[in-house]
């Protein structure tokens, strides 16, 4: 039977990684075999752990290209987890479709939008194939409402690929985002 593909999206601080870790716990508590991957570029808190902003962490295999997942898989895993999918190449979609065809459940999480309010291509591509999309919100850093959907960069500008945390980004609602962009 085909596996399920669950995708968790949202802005920074919306709890994507925490939710991914909760799913990992369900499998590990049930003594199920799993593999967790993350992009090697994400060395924000650790290069060998998936780490949430609250500090919860789980061991992960850092890889550069999505096809490298094949080097680590035994194909008897019940589920495969990938955090920060926005940093991966679009071939991640083919790897995921291959895994679910083999009956492995796949859980991914990542940003849907860049701080410039553009879609992250790999995440959006994956969303077309997901069986379930869990869209998370953050508390808006400006107005305090629980409607934060966009990440805003508080320092500099430049590349839409720029690893960082509280020192570089805040999560805001659409209205506050517009105001901040107008002020910048
Ligand atoms: P993500 O992977 O989406 O960036 P994490 O799961 O790593 O999110 O972290 C979520 C945690 O971040 C929350 O449980 C909360 O403790 C903390 N946090 C910090 N800032 C905010 C915010 N603006 N809105 C919601 N949670 C926040
Ligand atoms: P997070 O969603 O788990 O907080 O992590 C998002 C990562 O993506 C973090 O390292 C910052 C980075 N990032 C970008 O590279 N470009 C962007 O436009 C945004 C919003 C975040
Ligand atoms: Mg995260
Ligand atoms: Zn707001």
Image (cartoon, rainbow, N blue to C red):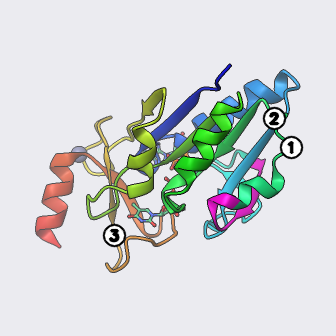
Q: Which of marks 3 and 1 is in front?
A: 1
CA separation in Å, label 2 and label 1: 7 Å
Left or right placement of residue 132 versus residue 46 in this view: left
In the rendered structure, which segment of residues is drawn in magenta? 58-67
Q: Which residue is drawn at 70% across and 52% down?
A: 37
Q: Which residue is drawn at 83% across and 24% down?
A: 29
Disc 3 residue crowd, few under 14, some 14–19, many 20+, Cα 10 Å = some
Q: Is residue 8 above or below residue 131?
A: below
**Which residue carries the number 2 mark?**
77
**Which residue carries the number 1 mark?**
74
Circles 3 and 1: CB distance less than 8 Å? no
Q: Residue at x 60, y 43 (%)?
A: 96
Secondary structure of the residue carrying tag 1 is loop
**Which residue carries the number 3 mark?**
154
Q: Which residue is drawn at 44% across and 31% down?
A: 133
Circles 2 and 1: CB distance less than 8 Å? yes
Disc 1 residue crowd, few under 14, some 14–19, many 20+, Cα 10 Å = few
Left or right placement of residue 24 versus residue 5 in this view: right
| Residue 33 is one of the magenta-drawn residues | no
Earlier residue among tags 2 and 3? 2
């Amino acid at each position: 039977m085909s596996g399920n593909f669950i995708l968790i999206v949202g802005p920074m601080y919306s709890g994507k990684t925490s939710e991914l870790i909760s799913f990992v716990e369900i499998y590990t508590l049930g003594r199920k075999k799993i593999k967790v991957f993350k992009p090697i570029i994400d060395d924000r808190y650790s290069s060998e752990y998936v780490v949430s902003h609250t500090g919860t962490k789980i061991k992960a295999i850092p890889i550069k290209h999505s096809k490298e997942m094949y080097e680590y898989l035994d194909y008897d895993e019940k589920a495969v987890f990938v955090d920060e999918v926005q940093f991966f190449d679009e071939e991640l979609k083919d790897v995921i479709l291959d895994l679910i065809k083999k009956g492995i459940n796949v859980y991914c999480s990542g940003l849907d939008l860049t701080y410039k309010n553009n879609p992250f291509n790999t995440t959006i591509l994956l969303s077309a194939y997901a069986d379930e999309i869990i869209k998370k919100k953050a508390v808006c850093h400006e107005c305090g409402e629980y409607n934060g959907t966009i990440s805003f960069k508080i320092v500099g500008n430049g590349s839409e690929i720029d690893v960082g945390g509280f020192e570089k980004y805040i999560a805001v609602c659409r209205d506050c985002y517009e105001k901040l962009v107008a002020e910048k």
